[in-house]
Image: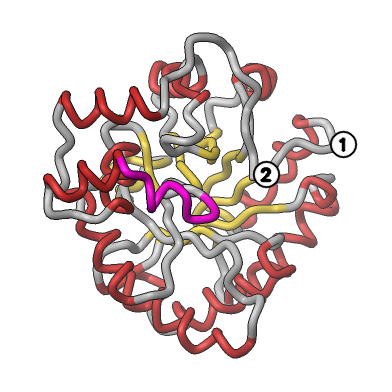
Amino acid sequence: MQTIELGGDSVPRIGQGTWHMGENAGQRKAEVRALREGIDLGMTLIDTAEMYAEGGAEEVVGQAIHDRRDEVYLVSKVYPHNASTKGVQDACERSLRRLGTDTIDLYLLHWRGQYPLSETVEAFERLREQGKILRWGVSNFDIDDLAELDAPACATNQVLYNPESRGIEYDLLPWQAQHNMPLMAYCPIGQGGALLHDATLQRIADKHSATTAQVALAWALRHPGVIAIPKAVNLEHLKQNAEAEKVRLDKDDLAQIDAAYPPPTRKQSLQMV
């Protein structure tokens, strides 16, 4: 598995997302099994958040890693309405209990809210001093937000990125590359399934004896500073995700994707889901 340096640690460039996990008790066993299988396949970065199923996804992750914590790079996120000095502390401690661990490797502000960034950063730094988190970062931040943050300690920015949503290529992606800040791409294979049934991606997938999901992942990973965190519960999909790094798109493939999903030619508002 290809790796990248994230906050001083080497992590896989393809991790595991957990959005929508923990919402259905009947799926708990399959979700836990999937995360454990993903770890076996080398996708040891697991991303979750207190927002996902209101803590339910963190509980799923906690069950999956309870005897494998030292194998996993664990990422979680705090709600903006909990991003005050006391709120961050309390939210992190709740997340730690649900995850069944003493430390979160990377703790993110899920998006900007009412509290000053300086207050949230101070709370993050306090958690780091306490050993409850090792590093911190942000999610859904645009360039202006990152410039206002002005914090070299910020390890990453997690944003929406896939062929359908590529506005960040105009400015945010190159800005992060210039500042050596890895970009963590959520929903890298799209939302709702339309991208996976796209005729252009299917032609490219057939050419490479791959799947459309693998093409979408390979497309995101063509940028050396990007980490992708697709979610999968189906074991075959997990294997395909793990092997997506082997797909090498050529200039013709990229030109076809550009024709179907044109790159941005001007500044766009940051997309979120």
**Magenta region: which residues?**
191-199
Label placed on residue 114: 1
Residue 140 visible (yes or no)? yes
- Relative image position of residue 271 (x, y in whole percent): 62, 33
Secondary structure beneath disc 2? strand
Residue type (three-letter) at the residue carrying disc 2: Leu
Q: Nearer the viewer, residue 218 or 103?
A: 218
Categorize mark 1 by other alpha carbons within 10 Å: few (<14), some (14-19), many (20+). Answer: few
Q: Which residue is mark 2?
A: 109
Q: Is residue 206 left or right of residue 30?
A: left
* Residue 255 coordinates in the image, percent (x, y): 25, 23
Taking the spot 62% from the left edge, 76% from the top edge, the residue there is 22
Does residue 216 lie above or below 235 as drawn? above
Kind of residue sitting beneath label 1 = Gln
Can I make out residue 155 in this image?
no
Q: Residue at x 38, y 52 (%)?
A: 197
Q: Name the one closer to the observer, 149 or 8.
A: 149
Which quarter of the rendered picture does the C terminus lie within? top right
* Along the line of sight, the residue nearer the viewer: 20 or 5: 20
